[in-house]
Amino acid sequence: MTTPSDIVIDVEGLTKTFGARTVVRDLSLQVRRGAIYGFLGPNGSGKTTTIRMLCGLLTPDAGSGTTLGYDIRTEADKIKRQVGYMTQRFSLYQDLSVRENLEFVARLYGLPEPPRAARDMIARLGLSGREEQLAGELSGGWKQRLALGACTLPSPKLLLLDEPTAGVDPKARREFWNEIHALAAEGLTVLVSTHYMDEAERCHEIAYIAYGVLLTHGTVDEVVAQSGLTTYTATGGDILKLSSALDGKSGVDTVAPFGNSLHVSGRDREALEKALAPYRDDRAITWTPSEPSLEDVFIELMNRAKDNFQ
């Protein structure tokens, strides 16, 4: 059972406009303590603006709410002091070593015994043996670990990750997410924006934002269920020809090749069945009912969001 003390972020009606464009419109959500909350959506959809408002880094034009128990409008400075922020671009000192970077951050935040704090973080993140290596000489995965160590060194209560694994190999990404889950298990709340579907599936909850509007949110299972998509997988025959034939047909909302198969989805089951009927008699093609994937859902949401943007 969720109690008020378990809710770290509770906002309602957030709106932010830059010039003539409304980047975030009437957004409301709650995030519980220790949750990994993923923000997904196309570029320019308002994900980063939303996260910055939630963390006190940007003041909304309308709406209200609290983060970590502090008012996002009047107590933003108190929020910011308890937030760790890891950007997509590596922002530590390239000409300092791993140890020097972490000791500098520890001193910056006034932590007792900076050398010890740095040693403990180096051990936690598996950076032992690389203490004296210059940050600029690290690979992408090791830079990512160092950046994570730097932004969690002051023991923040809220961690903001803005597309943190872009350009990082799959092994490093998995190790990074293992550490994020370990931190969340200790009570740290994490907000993360990502374009990777496998990363979205590792979040406790997700929100899909398109062109300023929150279209759906919840657990991955809830988001898939709420989509209302009926999905079929087609195998055999000329998949590319079939994809071209179905794309844009009434009743077909998404068509997406997956290897040697084709995912065909629609929100209106009757209209979808009607669209597929002419191809059911092709013996070269096997049609199998299937569960929509998270990617199916997001492609369909993105297709709908275009009208919203216009």
Image: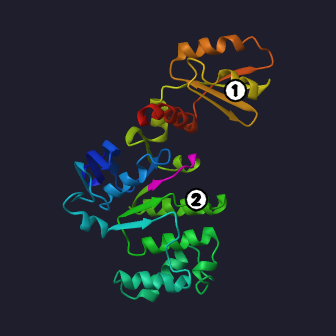
Residue topped by disc 2: 166
Q: What residue is at 45 percent from the left and 64 percent from the top? A: 183
Does 195 lie within the magenta span? Answer: yes
Q: Quick one: label 1, few (<14), some, or many (20+) residues within 10 Å?
A: some
Up/down of 295 relative to 193, above or below:
above
| Viewer-nearest residue: 234 or 214 | 214
- Mark 1 lies on a secondary structure that is helix
Which mark is first along the chain, 1 or 2?
A: 2
| Quarter of the rendering containing residue 57 | bottom left
Is 225 drawn above or below residue 271 in the view shown? below
Assign the N terminus to one quadrant of the image: top left
Kindly identify the amino acid type of the residue bearing the numbered disc 1. Ser
Residue 45 lies left or right of residue 66; in this view the side is right
Q: What's the amino acid at mark 2?
A: Ala
Q: Residue 76 magenta-drawn?
A: no
- Circle 1 residue: 243
Q: Residue at x 46, y 75 (%)?
A: 150
Q: Please report the residue visible at 37 percent of the width from the left and 83 percent of the height from the top.
A: 108
Is residue 260 rendered to the left or right of residue 216?
Answer: right
* Residue 257 percent location from the top left of the image: 69, 33
**Residue sitting nearer the eye, 8 or 208:** 208
Residue range highlighted in magenta: 192-197
Q: Quadrant of residue 250?
A: top right
From what the image shows, is residue 167 above or below residue 123? above
